[in-house]
Image: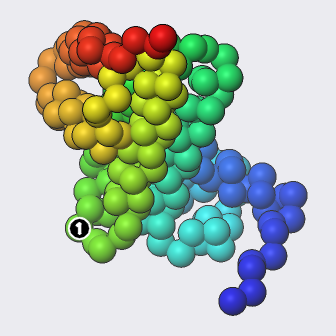
């Protein structure tokens, strides 16, 4: 199957402006943001929006996919800048913050959840893979236990972030994540 042609510079700018405007609207809690308002905020016509995204749901999916792309690109950067143990700690907190982003988008994501879209399964797989990379690096350094997998850790974080409906959940989720991180270090095989 032939690859789609790359977007021209102006089309790429329009697409990014649309994604940015939609992200701001959705994260701001405007689950009912109309495509016309998003296009206006992006400085383009609604026809331009529909050239890039066939439906409102396609736009929502792409906003969420971009959030996941940005999140899953960070483990390598964190490992370049920090020791594996610290990189893991920082990424765990980023995942909690991602859940906060998801809370802001939950209203608009409901329409995607009702479809057979693979976006959530793909996001879980990629996040688990990012966690596995960090766990393996920590285990190799002897600072993190080697008996926990990325998917298992992601499920644990899902339980922590499932408290989103309660007042003050983000502070509490960060505290519980710190406890979880301490548990990941306890029992780590010591390097010779």
Q: Residue furthest right?
A: 9
Q: Position of residue 99 (x, y in %)?
A: 33, 34
Which image quarter holds the N terminus?
bottom right
Q: Is residue 60 above or below residue 164?
A: below
Q: Residue at x 52, y 58 (%)?
A: 62
Residue 90 versus residue 42: which sits nearer the camera?
A: 90
Q: How many marks?
A: 1
**Residue with the most extreme front position:** 192
Most foreground residue, 37 or 4: 4
Q: How is the image coloured?
A: rainbow
Task: Answer above or below: position of 158 versus 11.
Answer: above
Task: Give coordinates of residue 5: x percent, y percent.
Answer: 81, 76
The picture quadrant where one finds residue 182 is top left
SS class, disc 1: loop
Q: Is residue 76 left or right of residue 57?
A: right
Left/right placement of residue 86 relative to residue 174 reads right
- At x 68%, y 48%, the residue is 17
- Which residue is most to the bottom? 1
Q: Can residue 40 be seen in this snapshot?
A: no
Label 1: few (<14), some (14–19) or many (≥20) C-alpha neighbours in 10 Å: few
Quadrant assignment, res 164:
top left
Relative image position of residue 30 (x, y in whole percent)? 37, 42
- Whether residue 165 sits left or right of residue 130 in the image: it is left
Q: Is residue 118 visible?
A: yes
Place of residue 124 in the rendered image (x, y in percent of width and height, measured from the top left): 36, 50
Please tell me which residue is depicted at 55% across the width and 46% down the height of the picture. Answer: 69
Q: Label 1, on which residue?
A: 114
Q: Residue at 48% of width from left, 11% of height from top?
A: 192
């Amino acid at each position: 199957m032939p690859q789609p042609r790359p977007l021209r510079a102006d089309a790429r700018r329009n697409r990014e402006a649309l994604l940015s405007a939609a992200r701001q609207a959705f994260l701001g809690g405007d689950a009912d943001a109309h495509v016309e308002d998003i296009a206006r905020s992006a400085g383009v016509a609604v026809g331009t929006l529909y050239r890039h995204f066939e439906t409102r749901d396609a736009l929502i999916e792409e906003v969420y996919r971009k959030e996941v792309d940005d999140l899953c690109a960070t483990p390598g950067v964190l490992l370049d800048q920090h020791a594996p143990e610290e990189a893991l700690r920082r990424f765990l907190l980023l995942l909690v913050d991602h859940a906060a982003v998801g809370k802001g988008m939950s209203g608009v994501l409901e329409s995607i959840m009702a479809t057979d879209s693979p976006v959530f399964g793909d996001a879980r797989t990629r996040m688990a893979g990012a966690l596995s990379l960090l766990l393996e690096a920590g285990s190799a350094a002897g600072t993190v236990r080697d008996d926990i997998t990325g998917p298992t850790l992601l499920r644990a974080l899902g339980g922590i972030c499932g408290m989103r409906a309660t007042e003050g959940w983000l502070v509490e989720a960060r505290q519980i994540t710190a406890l979880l991180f301490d548990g990941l270090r306890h029992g780590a095989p010591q390097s010779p």
